[in-house]
Each structure stands twice: as structure tokens, then as C-alpha cells.
Image (cartoon, rainbow, N blue to C red):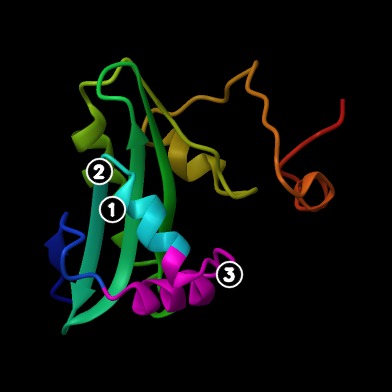
Amino acid sequence: MTIVWSDSRAEVDWHELEALYRAAPLGNKNADDLQVVFGNSMFCCFAREGGRLVGAGRVLADGRDCAYLCDIAVLPSHQGVGLGKQILERLIVQSQSHAKIILYSVAGREPLYAKFGFLRMKTAMAIFRNRQAAIERGLLSET
């Protein structure tokens, strides 16, 4: 597997990225919204193999205090071979100048992130647009 890495949004096919998130599966994120959120992100990472987008991720950051790693996705055909870890490593390196790096994990993936030094936050809270769906998916607790 020969991966070509890019941090540039200039040549991204947003519909291809939309298909990646759907396949990963990380939900239905439409191309226009992805262009906005990646455009507003301080750091981005794109992985291609044979010209095809096989992985991506991004970091929302303020340049000093807080960096939030999000939307890390890998095509199912490329999962389990370390590509997601490489994307995560690249984004962590890009975020090193921040006082804290934060992410929230898909349930069950926390052990992976712990290997990179992430610890569970005791005081994190969130407001989701669809609160009930987030509760049902295990992302939020009402207690």
C-alpha cells in the first residue's frame, strides 16, 4: 500500500470525501458541509492510494490553547492496517503547539486513543443538535 499524503484542501473532491465518510461509516456528511468544515479547520490530512481518497481527518484549533481532532475516517478496505493511526499521528504532530488536544471517540475505540496518550475527561459536556440520537448512540449520558 503506497499512500500519498496531503494537507491541502485545494484538490479535494468534496463528493469523494462525502462518499468516504458514508463508507467509513461516519454518517451522512454532505459535500457542501464538508467543504465548509474542512475550510474552517486549521489542519487537514488526506490519504490517497492510486489517486483514490482512502482516509482523511481534520483539526479545529485556535492556534494556541485548544485543538480538537475530528472526522478521522478510513475506507473499510483500508481499515485495520494502521492508516487511521497514521492520520491521527499526523494530526497530533500538527497540533503539538496547543496546550490541549481533545477528541471524542466512537464508543469502543477509546483504547486506541489511549495508546496515543489521550485520557478520559471527567468534566466534558456537550450539546448535540439531536440530543436523543446522541444518547441512543452512547455519546451522551443524562446522569
The residue at 59%/66% (across/down) is: 27
Dot placed on the residue nearer the N-terminal end, 2 or 1: 2
9 relative to 67, above or below = below
Residue denoted by label 1: 87
Residue 134 is left or right of residue 56, and the answer is: right
Give the residue type that dot 2 points to: Phe
Q: Position of residue 38 (x, y in %)?
A: 34, 53
Which region shows up in magenta? 13-32
Quadrant location, the C terminus: top right
Q: Is residue 82 visible?
A: no
Q: Position of residue 79 (x, y in %)?
A: 41, 69
Q: Main secondary structure of the magenta part?
A: helix
How far apart marks 2 and 1 lie (CA) works out to 11 Å
* Tags 2 and 3 touching, CB below 8 Å: no
Instruction: Please tell me whether residue 122 belongs to the stretch shown in magenta.
Output: no
Q: Position of residue 50 (x, y in %)?
A: 16, 84
Give the residue type that dot 3 points to: Asn
Residue denoted by label 3: 28
Residue 70 is left or right of residue 42, and the answer is: right
Quadrant location, the N terminus: bottom left
Give the residue type that dot 1 points to: Ile
Structural crowding at the residue carrying mark 2, measured as other residues with C-alpha within 10 Å and reported as few (<14), some (14–19) or many (≥20):
many
Residue denoted by label 2: 43
Structural crowding at the residue carrying mark 1, measured as other residues with C-alpha within 10 Å and reported as few (<14), some (14–19) or many (≥20):
many
Q: Nearer the viewer, mark 3 or mark 1?
A: 3
